[in-house]
Image (cartoon, helix red, strand yellow):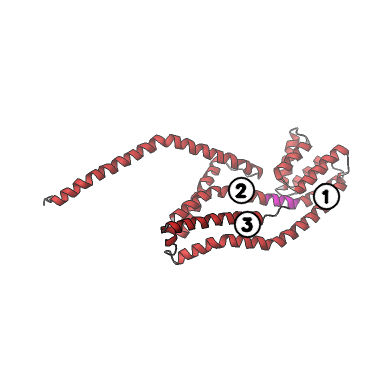
């Protein structure tokens, strides 16, 4: 059975053929452009990834977390993809998933920062027990390096890791005072500053470290008690700030899940998009101000 072409069909094919040829040419042109730019884009991507990994690796080394380069790179790539996918799966909005993927680029840095802060808090909490152990070791007749070795053997991480690094540097020929100064810069802890200053002054003037350590234990305990009291008084304001920061976002997501067409006016109209952009910018500024105002420097 042979189908005869009617004039209308022939005219339709005549109109479609140029568009089809243009689409094919555009496809091949785009492919050729990407093929030409691929080495340049690959070089830029590798440079950007290397800078990120070089920034992340020292943080991991400070926390004694040994991860190979490939695992760090894999985690850095997976974090934005997982974040974007989960947000898209929850909201079903492509642009929100894309925005979450870009925000996920900072997720690894945020996690590492939180881990580092948690590690410093645990280190500060171990200082009193460490000072008492050092004081007892010195009273029993041990020297300061021997007392530090006892601390490394008896205490749990992270204080044992940090002072273990001090001992290794000292065995390699670095003066003990310089090793302690490196530890002070590495941990950035005020209680540790007092301890290191006391040890350095004692080495220069020949003071009695056992009595100094006993006084430091009392000082650090009183300071810790005062800090705990201030934090307890400020928890309410911090909680209120975080609730006010996340409430508009949760409310918008809930309304969209209940009625997806509710925000059509804001999305389709020019003035609505301007108001939506103003709301997003205001929310970001408000979140920054809340975080700044609820931060306590002790």
Does 109 lie within the magenta span?
no
Residue at image x 73%, y 38%?
A: 168
Q: Give, as a single range, the part of the protein colored magenta.
A: 118-126
Q: Main SS of the magenta segment?
A: helix
Q: Which of marks 3 and 1 is nearer the N terminus?
A: 1
Q: Where is residue 39 in the image (x, y as percent from the top left)?
A: 43, 34
* Frontmost residue, 162 versus 280: 280
Label 2 secondary element: helix
Q: Can residue 92 be seen in this view?
A: no
Q: Is residue 290 above or below residue 106?
A: below
Q: How far apart are marks 1 and 2 (CA)?
A: 31 Å
Secondary structure type for disc 3? helix
Comparing 99 with 187, the one in front is 99
Q: Earlier in the sequence, mark 1 or mark 2?
A: 2
Mark number, residue 216: 1
The picture places residue 31, in percent across and down from the top left corner, at 35, 39
- The quarter of the picture where residue 290 lies is bottom right
- Which is nearer the eye, 288 or 134? 288
Q: Residue 259 carries which label?
A: none
Decide: few, some or many residues near mark 3? Use Cα within 10 Å; few <14, some 14-19, many ≥20. Answer: some
Estimate the spatial distance between the alpha carbons at disc 3 and disc 2, rounded to whole Å.
Answer: 22 Å
Q: What element carries label 1?
A: helix
Q: Work out whether 255 lies above or below 132.
A: below
Q: Is residue 275 above or below residue 158?
A: below
Q: Is 74 on the left-hand or right-hand side of 61? A: left
Near-viewer residue (158 or 273): 273
Q: Tell which residue pokes out farthest to the bottom in this image.
A: 258
Q: Residue 112 carries which label?
A: 2
Q: Which of marks 3 and 2 is nearer the N terminus?
A: 2
Q: Name the residue under label 3.
A: 290
Nearer the observer: mark 3 or 2; the answer is 3
Q: Position of residue 2 (x, y in %)?
A: 11, 50
């Amino acid at each position: 059975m042979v189908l005869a072409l009617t004039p209308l069909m022939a005219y339709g094919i005549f109109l479609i053929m140029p568009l089809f040829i243009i689409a094919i040419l555009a496809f091949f042109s785009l492919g050729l452009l990407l093929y030409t730019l691929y080495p340049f884009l690959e070089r830029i991507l590798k440079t950007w990834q290397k800078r990120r990994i070089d920034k992340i690796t020292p943080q991991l080394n400070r926390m004694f977390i040994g991860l190979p380069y490939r695992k760090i790179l894999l985690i850095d790539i997976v974090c934005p993809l997982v974040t974007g996918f989960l947000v898209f799966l929850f909201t079903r909005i492509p642009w929100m998933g894309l925005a979450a993927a870009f925000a996920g680029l900072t997720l690894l840095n945020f996690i590492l920062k939180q881990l580092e802060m948690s590690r410093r808090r645990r280190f500060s909490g171990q200082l009193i027990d460490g000072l008492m152990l050092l004081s007892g070791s010195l009273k029993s007749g041990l020297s300061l390096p021997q007392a530090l070795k006892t601390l490394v053997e008896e205490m749990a991480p992270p204080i044992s890791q940090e002072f273990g690094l001090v001992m290794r540097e000292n065995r390699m020929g670095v003066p003990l005072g310089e090793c302690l100064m490196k530890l002070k810069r590495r941990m950035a802890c005020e209680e540790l500053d007092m301890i290191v200053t006391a040890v350095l002054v004692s080495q220069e003037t020949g003071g009695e470290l056992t009595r100094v350590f006993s006084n430091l234990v009392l000082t650090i305990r009183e300071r810790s008690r005062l800090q705990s009291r201030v934090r307890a008084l400020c928890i309410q304001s911090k909680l209120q700030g975080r609730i006010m920061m996340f409430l508009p976002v949760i409310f918008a997501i809930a309304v969209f899940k209940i009625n997806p067409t509710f925000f059509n006016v804001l999305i389709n109209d020019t003035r609505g998009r301007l108001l939506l952009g103003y709301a997003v910018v205001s929310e970001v500024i408000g979140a920054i101000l809340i975080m700044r105002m609820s931060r306590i420097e002790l």
